[in-house]
Amino acid sequence: MREIHRILDANFNRAREALRVAEDCGRFALNDPAITAMAKDLRSDLREMLSAMPVDEMIASRDTPGDIGTEITSPSEADRSGLPDVAVAACKRLTESLRTIEEYGKIIDPGRSLQIERMRYNAYTLEQRLTGRLQVADRIARTKLYVLISSELCAGSLRSKARAALAGGGEVIQLREKNVSDDVFLAFAAELRELTDEMGKLFIVNDRPDIAAIVGADGVHLGQHDLPIAEARRLLRPGAAVGRTTRSVDQARAAVNEGADYVSIGPIFPSVTKNAGDALGPDVITDFCRDITVPVIPIGGITAENVSQVVDAGARRVAVCSAVCGQDDPKQAARAIRAQIPDIDQDE
């Protein structure tokens, strides 16, 4: 049994170390209480599992000087270009270690296998949440439907409207509030952060990097006269996205040079949501998509009836507001728009 004890000892150590790396990323880098709590719960479960194992025999079987694995490393082991690489590597070590514990643990205590299996599934969820928070810009690039939501346009519950929009195919929710107090804005933002976490979607706050930072939003969207992008990033967690509203290719180029992860252009059609100037028309989208290197998101007056014009001009993602959250059935409204947007991978 010594070899079994040695395998279990090594993998409990690997899992514990990987969980600490993941927890520290969630706690100190992302300031994310949900991720931190998930990692802490898994560490607690791991300690409980270890207490049921023959710990003395496992420690006695340890032979670090004689472990041939300490002399073998892969070329990618030292390759960490940023937080996403660190988080992904830690989560992979965690799930692999739990799988090994599950299989070899059956020899020691077969009754524990289901408990370890549940821990492994929880670890997959932790990996999804952690890496998703660190790869926001890539997810926005793959987005087809970006939905703005405002309490002024939503009759009834803001949360229920947002849930319906996401269920209908929305991938990003942006909270836009111009006429509410800060405490109300913060309460709305916290509620939508919780909802988007639950549904695995992105949450962006309009204009307010401070509110975005407090609730751990996935990013902030800035107007032409809002904070510089670099200053907004100082308030946001690592990996958070920053978008910029633009009306011309020159403004969009300036936003890209400033570090924007994406730009919106509009209004494409006359908009009832806000007074953003004269409609630009769908033809401008062609120039934007040709000249701008970050994702371009047309906005303004886009509906299920005219979205085909936007797509024909080259758009592969759109932002909408009243066309979804102002409707009686936001789920169906979102579905009708999203169905007309081609898959990005097939066209870009």
Image (tube, helix red, strand yellow):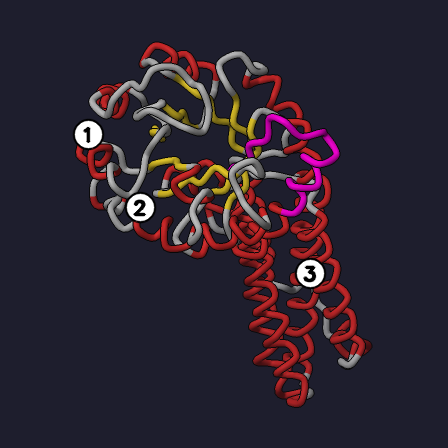
Quick one: label 3 or label 2, which is nearer the N terminus?
Answer: 3
Q: Amino acid at mark 2?
A: Ile
Task: From this view, report whether residue 115 is shown above or below residue 45.
Answer: below
The residue drawn where x is 56% and y is 35% is 152
Helix, strand or loop for disc 1: loop
Q: Quadrant of residue 147?
A: top left
Gap in Å between the C-alphas at discs 1 and 2? 16 Å
Q: Provide residue 168's location: percent of width, then percent of height.
A: 40, 54
Task: From this view, report whether residue 11 is shown above or below residue 182.
Answer: below
Q: Nearer the viewer, mark 1 or mark 2?
A: 2
What range is drawn magenta here?
A: 174-191
Q: Toward the viewer: 138 or 328?
A: 328
The residue drawn where x is 37% and y is 29% is 299
Query: Can you identify the residue that label 1 sits on?
Result: 313
Q: Is residue 96 visible?
A: yes
Q: Amino acid at mark 1?
A: Ala
Q: Provide residue 49's location: percent of width, then percent of height.
A: 74, 76
Q: Toward the viewer: 247 or 79?
A: 247
